[in-house]
Image: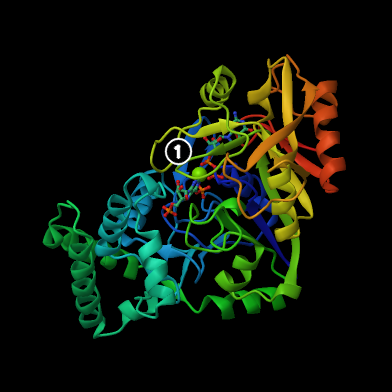
Amino acid sequence: MAVDLLLGLQWGDEGKGKIVDVLTSKYKIIARFQGGPNAGHTLVFNGKKHVLHTIPSGIFHEDTANLVGNGVVIDPVIFKKELDKLEKQGVDYRKSLLISRKAHIILPTHRLLDAASEAAKGKAKIGSTLKGIGPTYMDKTGRNGIRVGDIELADWKIKYRALANKHEAMIAFYNVDIQYDLKELETEFFDAIKTLKSLKFIDSEEFLHQAQKSGDSILAEGAQGSLLDIDFGTYPFVTSSNTTAAGACTGLGIAPNKIGDVFGIFKAYTTRVGSGPFPTELFDEVGETMGRVGHEFGATTGRSRRCGWLDLVALRYACQINGVTQLIMMKGDVLSGFKTLKVCTAYNYNGNEITHLPFNIEAENVTPLYTDFKGWDEDLTQMTEASQMPKELNDYIAFLEKELEIPITIVSVGPDRKQTIIR
Ligand code: GDP
Ligand code: IMO
Ligand code: MG
């Protein structure tokens, strides 16, 4: 059976967690393929909000297997905190949670290195979540990393010590003021490693291969968004993994010809957290209203998210790179009450009108060109059927479908599981 993918098409926080949770009843396996605790995926049901960082968003469905794939980087300390929260809520994860032996481990010194690197960059900082993501993926590609399977081996602490020592020398090299007590961090780390070791480690590519052969349905869950992809995002203001469809192949061991549907998620407007270019960013009351009504604060760091109009140039690019087959539009409810809505349909790029995403999208090169739409006043949050949606929202959706040539099959009108309209 083909593997479906679900991934973000903007700069992250599109609402992946909510939709994975909504779709989970259709799948036997949910598998995270990249990223780590830099992600914050929010789920709301039965009046309660849950935020997941590394654990797949299908975990609240007991009959679904939840796999942390080889492309993911795991911080045992944060992972343990997530498990403790689940335990308190009575979620029995021991049977359903599976971890790839090939996933890499974030060490305490990776986090410190992240902080040192950002401090050394000063104003040019990436705006990293400081979870050690960049340094851990650097050690992975540099062939120095420690993997989940390593901690089952007797001598892994020797490898750990050598790597941590090297990291300390690198931190000193940055010559910035980073205060830390490694002994204390290590006590917490090794304690969390014990918890991690109590979970089920598997050879996940084989597990997924057998599952596909038996006809089990699989949904791969992405983290971050396409514009944060290490190759195709707004480099260097990106994360350190492939957040796009290809990342699901390498992050899980799925062959490209085994991919079925690619669900691309986007907000009806755009947000970004951290540094980097954002052509349609608003610095006025309209942007402030989006942020306030949409509660646009990072689920991992609490930082306020930058807000702006929908950017179709960037969205078209993301659809192409990922081969999106179905679109899911989130947070349409946040746009209720705006008299006029704007959608960026092209860029003025150094005097020329273009409709593709160029190499450089900094404000000095790019000015967005907008098409205006009449807004709607209706509150969408209680709507459950497409037939209830106002004409202006239907016009907005029809325009996006025509421009992107992909159907919008789900419209989300609130954070709750139930606030989801299937078209
Ligand atoms: P993710 O990282 O892609 O899973 O997204 P986040 O959880 O970081 O951010 C999405 C935020 O929007 C969360 O606070 C969700 O609860 C919320 N949310 C999701 N869908 C909707 C929606 O349709 N309308 C509104 N108002 N909020 C939503
Ligand atoms: P989810 O899965 C939004 C951003 C950070 C920063 C850049 C690099 O919840 O959508 P990193 O910690 O990876 O070194 O940060 O990427 N970023 C995210 N922004 N949502 C996320 O994940 C993000 N994960 C990383 O803000 O700009
Ligand atoms: Mg998020």
* In the rendered image, the vertical position of residue 246 relative to residue 150, given as above or below: above
Image coordinates of residue 344 in percent, x first then y, are 72, 35
Of residues 158 and 3, the one nearer the viewer is 158
Where on the picture, by quarter, is residue 377? top right
Quadrant in the picture for the N terminus: bottom right
Q: Secondary structure at mark 1?
A: loop
The answer to whether the residue bearing label 1 lies less than 8 angstroms from the nearest atom of ligand 2 is: yes
Q: Would you say 346 lies left or right of 16 here?
A: right
Of residues 225 and 76, the one nearer the viewer is 225
Disc 1 marks a residue whose amino acid type is: Gly
Residue carrying label 1: 298
Residue at image point 67% right, 49% down: 23
Q: Would you say 240 lies left or right of 322 here?
A: left
Whether residue 415 is visible here, answered yes or no, is no
Of residues 53 and 351, the one nearer the viewer is 351
Residue at image point 34% right, 80% down: 150
Quadrant in the picture for the C terminus: top right
Which colour style is shown? rainbow
Residue at image point 42% right, 50% down: 126
